[in-house]
Amino acid sequence: LAKTTQPISMDSYEGQEVNITCSHNNIATNDYITWYQQFPSQGPRFIIQGYKTKVTNEVASLFIPADRKSSTLSLPRVSLSDTAVYYCLVGDQRNTDKLIFGTGTRLQVFP
Amino acid sequence: DAGVTQSPTHLIKTRGQQVTLRCSPKSGHDTVSWYQQALGQGPQFIFQYYEEEERQRGNFPDRFSGHQFPNYSSELNVNALLLGDSALYLCASSFNDHRVNFPQDGYTFGSGTRLTVV
């Protein structure tokens, strides 16, 4: 069971880069790493997904070391609208019940 | 392109009553998963439907049941409501691509139904 551990909260200022690290020591061979963002009273929104090394899209980067026991979500130049809860998930779609959201990381961005 | 649509957005029920929540998946998606999210907690997986059958189930009692229709839409039913069932119920859809281990763009979530049991 690939349980994840994230910091409960983080603070940042507009324009800074934010890195949120997730630990997943028991990650299985078939598991992918996925990050979601959630605003209050909304459903989570997919941000980025990866299996190994580095993945980048228009909103974030995901860094995964060779042992895959952790991953880091990098948000470049955050704005106030990036204030949200960020969840790290590890799993295989064939075992959806193993996708544990946890309590996530509450990111607060200040002006 | 419409995303995931859930109805109703808010609902108030009395203990012991039954409730039905509805979900229309994103166009092109064939798999629907339901989650319960209590205040301040992460979403908890209830079950997943694919090809009109329950494929996987989380740690929820039999009071929680569901259905998927031929058009891929889905319903979540909760019987004998308890105060502890008060939560945000989220529906997530995806396309079941057997060639990969995970949906390439993750799961698409709806905005949820806020259920309050009094």
Image (tube, rainbow, N blue to C red):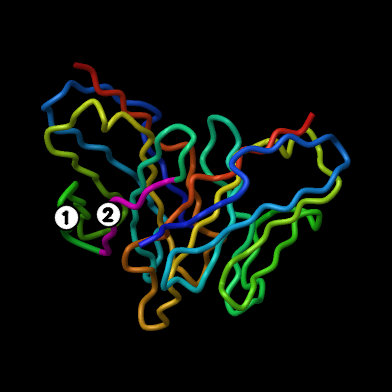
The secondary element bearing badge 2 is classed as strand
Q: Which of marks 2 and 1 is nearer the N terminus?
A: 2
Q: Tell me where residue B32 appears, x and y as whole percent.
A: 55, 65
The residue at which mark 1 appears reads as A57
Question: Is B54 in the magenta?
Answer: no
Task: Work out whether B34 lies above or below B17.
Answer: below
Q: Mark 1 and mark 2 in contact (Cβ < 8 Å)?
A: yes
Q: In the image shown, does A7 or A104 lie closer to the viewer?
A: A104
Label 2 Cα crowd, 10 Å radius (few <14 / some 14-19 / many 20+):
many
Q: In the image shown, does A21 or A14 lie closer to the viewer?
A: A14
Task: Work out whether A11 lies above or below B36.
Answer: above
Residue at the limit of the structure toward the top, as seen here: A111
Q: Which quadrant would residue A51 be assigned to in this image?
A: bottom left
Task: Work out whether A6 lies above or below A80.
Answer: below
Of all chains, the one bearing label 2 is A
Q: What stretch is highlighted in magenta?
A: A44-51
Of all chains, the one bearing label 1 is A
Q: Disc number at residue A48?
A: 2
Type of the residue with mark 1 = Asn
Type of the residue with mark 2 = Ile
Q: In the image shown, does B78 or B3 lie closer to the viewer?
A: B3
Q: Tell me where residue B95 appears, x and y as whole percent.
A: 43, 72
How would you classify the magenta stretch by its main secondary structure?
Answer: strand
- Distance from disc 2 to disc 1, alpha carbons, whole Å, reads 7 Å
User: Residue A68 vs residue B108: left or right?
Assistant: left
The secondary element bearing badge 1 is classed as loop
Q: Tell me where residue A1 appears, x and y as whole percent.
A: 51, 58
